[in-house]
Image: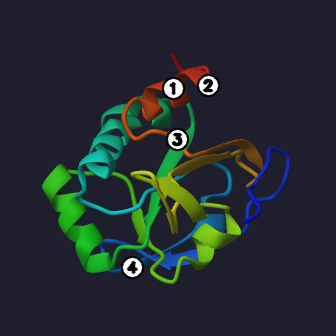
Amino acid sequence: MPRLTPGENAPDFTLPTADGGTLTLSDLRGTSVVVYFYPAAGTPGCTTQACDFRDSLASLTAHGYAVVGVSPDTPAKLAAFVEAEHLTFPLVSDPEHTVMEQWGAWGEKSLYGKTVTGVIRSTVVLDAAGVVTLAQYNVKATGHVAKLRKDLGID
């Protein structure tokens, strides 16, 4: 599966959100956007990562970044995750993994020594025009947001 690289335009998408609406990526033009892909709401690693984004959101926003989380979970499962973890940024549902495939965040990966197909934990940062400035694949859930903040020059 091809991965996005800095300098290319990110594919646009419109996906259902946890709150019952939809989010269209191009509607966020004018703001830099951190789009992160995670396997499953409510699991330990994904909860750690989402809470790290939640806890860093004020700083990211102050530096001009919006955050969007993408998973194959249903909007209802995302809504429960948002409520349970008090998440304050949009989560969108990609159950057919169409967007994940376009962005290089779906494919073969190693899980407990076995090769499986699924979500590749990834983060892609876009500038205000929707151009990729940073693309990180196979990231770790724990410590990733701190590393991202450093890579973005926030810390």
Q: Residue 95 carries which label?
A: none
Residue at the spot of label 1: 147
Is 26 on the left-hand or right-hand side of 62? Answer: right
- Of residues 120 and 13, which is closer to you in this image? 120
Q: Residue at x 59, y 68 (%)?
A: 100
Q: Do the numbered discs 3 and 1 sit on residues whose CB atoms are within 8 Å? A: yes
| Alpha-carbon span between mark 4 and mark 2 | 32 Å
**Element on which disc 3 rests:** loop
Residue at the spot of label 3: 139
Residue at the spot of label 4: 21
Q: Do the numbered discs 3 and 2 sit on residues whose CB atoms are within 8 Å? A: no
| Alpha-carbon span between mark 3 and mark 1 | 10 Å
Q: Residue at x 54, y 31 (%)?
A: 148
Query: Is label 1 or label 4 in front?
Result: 1
Query: Looking at the image, is mark 4 or mark 2 earlier in the sequence?
Result: 4
| Image: 88 above or below 51 | below
Q: In which quarter of the image is residue 18?
A: bottom left
Q: Which residue is drawn at 37% across and 53% down?
A: 89
The kind of residue tagged 4 is Gly
How many labels were placed on the picture? 4
Query: Looking at the image, is mark 1 or mark 4 earlier in the sequence?
Result: 4
Query: Looking at the image, is mark 3 or mark 2 earlier in the sequence?
Result: 3
**Element on which disc 1 rests:** helix
**Element on which disc 2 rests:** helix
Q: Quadrant of residue 2?
A: bottom right
Q: From this viewpoint, which residue is outermost toward the bottom?
A: 96
